[in-house]
Amino acid sequence: MLFIILVSCVATIGGFLFGFDSGVINGTVDGLQAAFKSDSVGTGFNVASMLLGCAVGAFCAGRLADLFGRKTILIIAAIFFIISAWGSGIADTSGEFILYRILGGLAVGAASVMAPAYISEIAPARLRGMLTTIQQVAIICGLFAAFVSNYFLADLAGVSTADLWMGFSAWRWMFWIELVPACLFLGSLLFIPESPRFLVIKNKLPQAEEVLIRLYGVRAGELKLTDIKASLADDHQPKLSDLKDKQSGKVRKIVWVGIGLAVFQQLVGINVVFYYGAVLWQAVGFSESDALLINIISGAVSIAACIITMVLIDKIGRKPLLTLGSIGMTLTLGLMVFCFATSDFDSSGNLDLGSLGTLALVSANAYVFFFNLSWGPVMWVMLGEMFPNQIRGSGLAVAGLFQWGANFAITMTFPIMLTSIGLAGAYGFYALSALLSVLFVVKLVHETKGTELEDMIG
């Protein structure tokens, strides 16, 4: 069991980098605008460009992992994280910066689908939810680390656009800090085994048996090998066309549910808080320093929520947590819309929340809490386990593509929405999406708690 936990923790370093790479941009927006002289649309694309890489990375990783292995794809992702962290900080032009961010996006996309899939394929059913939830804890820890790093680097320099060390601006050092965990991830991956289910698919049965015995012990490992072989006995090498039902010729229902989970996780607007948190709070009158400090508070709230989920997910199940989260986000986003809609503008053009400032801040952090209690970790848990063995790679590829595509759309449109319909309009859309997600969960999502991967049906 200790070996399973250690291997899972190595895989979740990818989640940490996923979070760090996503959150670090939060404190660099002012620096990007100053360095590249970009307008709101240009800034939106600089921030969102990584997500194009994420969509491609998630889609390709699922398929490539079926060909070359889960571990191999994670190693490639680690290398891309290193290159992107260095290049994003050294970039002199917007085009160069976007290139490195897209490269980092390929790594984030690959890690986002492969880490939970890998953990699901090595973990016993009774612990799978908890161990996979560690991935979301790692993502939030990565975000939190990025927020803390951004805050202290900006504080040391005075502002993020000022020089810090060696003649480079603080915002550039915000990217370079990521080199430390990225190198640790690459080194650690060299010591973990390949997924036993992938090895069985590739007919490498001796290697698969060896890994399963290391994970579960001799008797349990041999029994698990028999189960995996039986589940794949009548199947062929995985391919994208497996996502269609052989009888009807239509895309399997489980694939549409996976796409729905992936898209709704983004439509509720959480990454606006992750990517534009500093911009949001500056827009309602907080200083840059205070806005970055609020991000740290949000990160701490997120970690607490994920830990609660890690304890509960294998006890009460996935669907109840998703339902609770959707209801909570609908209410808290609604309160934020009320605060933004009923406030006036000050002389600088920013919203003056006045006495509603405390309510807006509490509601925002409550929203973050409900998301990370539910859709944040549970969506990744379900995507990693809900697909049958034969279509897991392809199912993850398609769901990951839609997840990151929706992420790109939400992130790219927020600066435009901010200037056209205001904060109240933007958050009104996210609140409506949260309300619709309640209906989606109740009607279409099926519980997967305690079900062996070999027993998943699609």
Image (cartoon, rainbow, N blue to C red):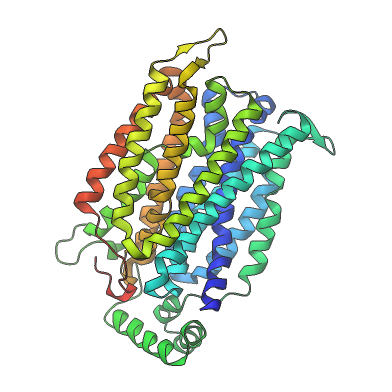
Is residue 447 placed above or below 351 in the rendered structure? below
**Front position in the image: 246 or 193:** 193
Is residue 64 placed above or below 138 in the rendered structure? below
Q: Provide residue 296's location: percent of width, then percent of height.
A: 59, 40
Q: Does residue 104 show up?
A: no
Residue lying farthest to the left in this orientation: 248
How many discs appear?
0
Name which quarter of the figure residue 95 lies in.
top right
Residue lying farthest to the bottom in this orientation: 219
User: Is 65 left or right of 164, judged from the image as shown?
Assistant: left
Q: Provide residue 142's location: percent of width, then percent of height.
A: 59, 50
Residue at 41% across / 50% down in the picture? 373
**Front position in the image: 113 or 67:** 113
Residue at 27% across / 37% down in the picture? 435
Quick one: quadrant of the C terminus?
bottom left
Residue at 37% across / 34% down in the picture? 332
Residue at 67% across / 54% down in the picture? 82
User: Is 454 left or right of 86, judged from the image as shown?
Assistant: left
Q: Does residue 68 show up?
A: yes
Residue lying farthest to the top in this orientation: 347
Is residue 32 placed above or below 148 in the rendered structure? above
Q: Provide residue 423's location: percent of width, then percent of height.
A: 43, 23
